[in-house]
Amino acid sequence: MREIPIIVLANQKGGVGKTTTASALADGFRLKGARVLAIDCDPQGNFSEAQSRLLVPGTASIEDFIEGGHVKADEAGQALVPAFPDLALWGRGEREIDSYLLADAIERARNDGTENGRWDVCIIDTHPGLDPITAQALVAATHIILPTTPDKYGLEALDQSLGFIEGLVDLNRNSVGENIGVAITMYRTIVSLHNKSAEKIKVVCKERNIKLLGKPISLQSDIQRAQDEGKSIFEVSTVLHGGILRYSWFVDDVISWINKGYESR
Ligand code: ADP
Ligand code: MG
């Protein structure tokens, strides 16, 4: 079976827009007609909440999934593997960082003889901190996207996260090292520090041969409203503007980034 893109949103800093970006990506892909497997690896479960309209009763949560549990997709082929609060304890002590439990679980689900074999893309949200479950997601990834805020701590977190990822690249079986991208999040044009930091992020991306995806995503209250109402951000307003428009450009850029990679093989 042809491999599918497995896109992991990661950053060791919290509150940088990982979950918001994961949801925008999953919703954006669906708008293009893609069948999405959404996986929440953050025990906080925000991604599961944001995508809860896709939850099919009786589907495996992330722990069951890793242990061989079945994913159930809805009629349209969309599926969500939700988080589980005890996930925070997963992997403490007994799990090896260099195992492929999550990667194998995705492969198994795609080959289980159901409609699951028709997923077009898998999107995985992770939690801040780089621990065994995040490592599982990173070694499974074909593409890693680091949402990064344009400020001092955001830049530091980018550097630290890239350091961690580099340590795992050898374990990844999908040459993810060539497919690392950054999205600048929570951007405010009127804040000159944001402009300066966004420029610095561009330089870091160039130096490290990392793809800077889309245009900086601006802050927009509609994005929080969508989260509050459990809707897709593309659904809350008929005219796309501000951060939501930027997210739609971001989705297009991610799609062309992924397609370019597949063409060049
Ligand atoms: P993380 O998953 O990295 O912890 P979140 O995606 O949960 O980050 O974002 C942190 C907070 O910032 C959330 O309350 C979210 O609603 C808000 N947020 C993120 N991006 C935007 C944006 N572009 N506009 C408005 N609020 C945003
Ligand atoms: Mg989150």
Image: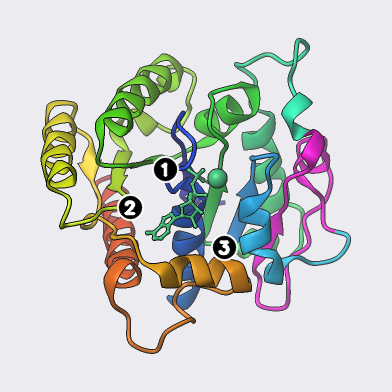
| 51 horizontally vs 27: left or right | right
| Residue that numbered label 1 is attached to | 16
Residue 131 placed where, x, y %? Answer: 60, 22
Vertical position of residue 75 compared to residue 5: above or below: below
Q: Residue at x 42, y 18 (%)?
A: 164
Q: Work out which residue is located at the far bottom of the displayed protein and give it.
A: 238
Decide if residue 3 is in sight here.
no
**Local crowd at mark 2 within 10 Å, few (<14), some, or many (≥20)?**
many
Report the predominant secondary structure element of the magenta stretch.
Answer: loop
Task: Assess whether mark 2 and mark 1 are in contact (beta carbons under 8 angstroms).
Answer: yes
Q: Mark 3, mark 1: which one is toward the viewer?
A: 1
Q: Residue at x 17, y 38 (%)?
A: 197
Q: Does label 3 or label 2 sit earlier along the sequence?
A: 3
| Residue that numbered label 2 is attached to | 186
Q: Is mark 1 within 8 Å of ligand 1?
A: yes
Residue 163 placed where, x, y %? Answer: 36, 17
Identify the secondary structure beneath mark 1. Answer: loop
Q: Is residue 84 magenta?
A: yes
